[in-house]
Image (spheres, rainbow, N blue to C red):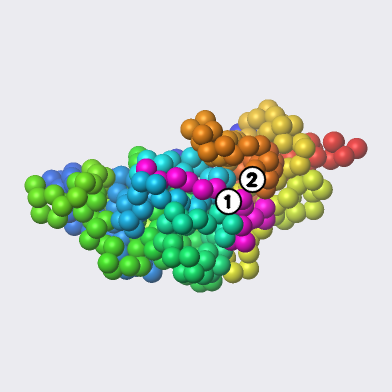
Amino acid sequence: MAVPLLDLTGQYKQIGNELEAAVVGVLASGRYVFGPVLESFEHNIARYCDAKAALGVASGTDALILSLKACGVGPGDEVITTAFTFFATAEAVSNIGAVPVFVDIDPVTYNMDPSKVPQKITPKTKALMPVHLYGQCADMDALNTLAKKYDMVVIEDACQAIGARYKGKRAGALGDTGAFSFFPSKNLGAAGDGGLITTIREDLVETIAMLRVHGSKQRYFHHFLGFNSRLDPIQAALLDVKLKYLDDWNEKRRENAAYYNQLLGDLKGVEIPVEKDYNYHIYHQYTIRVKGLRDRVIKALEENQIGCSIYYPLPVHRQEPYAYLGYGPGSLPETEKAAAEVISLPIYPELTHSQQDEVCDVIRQVVTKAAR
Ligand SMILES: *Cc1c(COP(=O)(O)O)cnc(C)c1O
């Protein structure tokens, strides 16, 4: 039995009728940009995240770019972030003319290590951009304390963390702004690209709203340079339907993670994910570490038609566009070690225990064979 890394058709089978009705409703309404369907979704997701406001944009990448702009980050400023993330995190910083400064990760959570932040702060530092990697929040109390002390804004890259909680509070309400992605593979996925910015700061709402419409409040009168970055009502309609199911789906992912933990927890050489006791992890990815045997495990999984992936094989500081920053090999040791050892396994809500048994049997075989 093949086990894909992700299968979105199961979700469609579950709620397809509802999704189709939502799309048809928008088509019939004649409102294809902005309008009540988008506003309703924004209202619901702001409430879901305990944020003051939520504003739809065209992608998670744009959510990061517009957040940085709204917070006044610009050319020459430095933004402290992590290199163990999807490329877009740093790309957003660079595309507004600022410079990403990479700190190493905590090897247990894969998130920004707050203890390593102070040594990276310079007079040019303007913002902290932690990533809630794989769906588990970074240590936000420690990061917010630093932000206050050194006068930095905090932009959460919450693209993988919708519904995650830190000490009871939702991702997206833990910094000045939160950036979300509705890329189809995310826990709340659109039928195409989409993104959203949450904020707990009333004073940022109007600026963000203007940034997504060419810096205008009233049509054809422009106060600053902005973007064309909107979340389509068709996507908002789909997402509003799916939002009702999100908590159940996230719970299902957590159950699947717990089952994997049970199957893999005693395997020597395999490290299962660690959920900090103050976190509610939503397992966008279920990521294990395999020391030394990764290539063999991946090969065996592939031979058995089991999907897996490496997030991320080449950390951002080692990517071509960042060669100019001069981070040599070994400059972020925990990031580089993680990039060499992680494997993400199928974890979507519709995954069955027998599929998980199969995944773990293959891994167990490789690991026990190597130990003999
Ligand atoms: C998905 C993702 C993004 C980018 O989102 P898009 O919607 O694809 O632009 C940014 N950061 C992280 C951590 C992501 O996982």
* Residue that badge 2 annotates: 332
Quadrant assignment for the N terminus: top right
Residue at (77% x, 37% y) in the render = 292
Mark 2 vs 1: CB contact within 8 A = yes
Which of these two is toward me, 250 or 146? 146
Q: Secondary structure at mark 1?
A: strand
- Magenta-drawn stretch contains 130: no
Given the image, on which type of amino acid does mark 2 rest?
Leu
Does residue 369 lie above or below 35 as drawn? above
Residue at (44% x, 54% y) in the render = 124
Q: Earlier in the sequence, mark 2 or mark 1?
A: 1
- Magenta-drawn stretch contains 112: yes
Given the image, on which type of amino acid does mark 1 rest?
Val
Q: Which residues are magenta?
A: 97-116
Which secondary structure type mostly characterizes the magenta part of the structure? loop
Q: Secondary structure at mark 2?
A: loop
* Residue that badge 1 annotates: 103
